[in-house]
Image (spheres, rainbow, N blue to C red):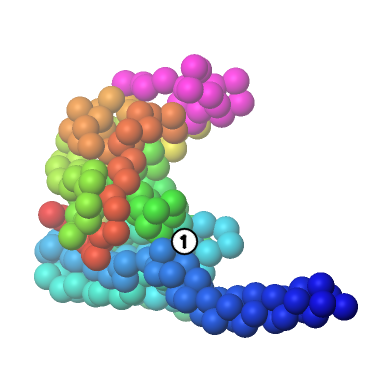
Amino acid sequence: MATLSSSHHFNNIALLLLLLLVPSIVSLLSVATATTPLTITVVNNCNFTVWPAIQPNAGHEVLERGGFALTTLTHRSFQAPPHHWTGRIWARTSCVYAHGRFACATGDCGRMECGGAGGKAPASLAQFSFHHADDLSSYGVSLVDGFNVPMTVTPHEGKGECPVVGCRANLLATCPAALQMKDPHGSGAVVGCKSGCEAFGTDKLCCRNHYNSPQTCRASTYSEFFKHACPATVTYAHDTPSLTHNCASPREMKIIFCH
């Protein structure tokens, strides 16, 4: 009986200690897994209005209803989710309301607030993965889908590998004739520079089917045009993975159009 009584007493003490310790353990775990608040700032330095669009990857929430207007020399800031989020941001250009619908010359998603819908190429893309691993934020600028406006991504107050990346050059002025996209409204101006895939649609240029691997998907003369002008961008599907950077605990990600 003494043994049973001692055992019962010990179990009560152990339970009491566990109940006292649980809040502390939970508090420590929450501190260990807490993410640094992250502000996303979108800046329009272009001399024309752009309509930024935001598309989350599958399973992630839509931010800022997926799109908004940003007049010249203005910016808009909003909070990133406090948990893991992946997606992309791009600019739409020459947008108008016509015949009862909203449409853009480049990057069009079919409406003002994209609501998670993707856009039409060509478009310069910023790609993100926030709050993964030990509060890392990965980012990069892609011209795989072509180019419509100069674009850079600048992390602020992060630790580790946090360079400014993107494309500051206006490639509309030097875009090869075969890749040029002209203004659909009839002005004749070049409003976009297509990728080789978008312009010609071959498996080789699109890195499809047999060409969908790092061994068979190679740079082309068309991707090299983008790479030569903007080396800190991804220019074809299996381009150098190191062009995507991991920055620890940044407090702001600034996307600048026409930097």
Type of the residue with mark 1: His
Indicate whether 119 appears above or below 177: below
Task: Give 95 or 222, whichever is nearer the viewer.
Answer: 222
Segment colored magenta? 202-221
Residue 143 on image: x %, y %? 33, 41
- Circle 1 Cα neighbour tier, 10 Å, few/some/many (<14 / 14–19 / ≥20): some
Residue position marked by numbered label 1 in the rendering: 84
Residue 74 on image: x %, y %? 16, 73
Indicate whether 255 appears above or below 198: below
Residue 236 placement, left or right of 187: right
Q: Quadrant of the C terminus?
A: bottom left
Q: Residue at x 32, y 33 (%)?
A: 242
Residue 212 falls inside the magenta stretch: yes
Q: Residue at x 35, y 54 (%)?
A: 137
Residue 235 placement, left or right of 207: left
Q: Quadrant of the N terminus?
A: bottom right
Task: Locate residue 10: give its quadrant.
Answer: bottom right
Task: Give 159 or 183, whichever is nearer the viewer.
Answer: 159
Q: Residue furthest top?
A: 215
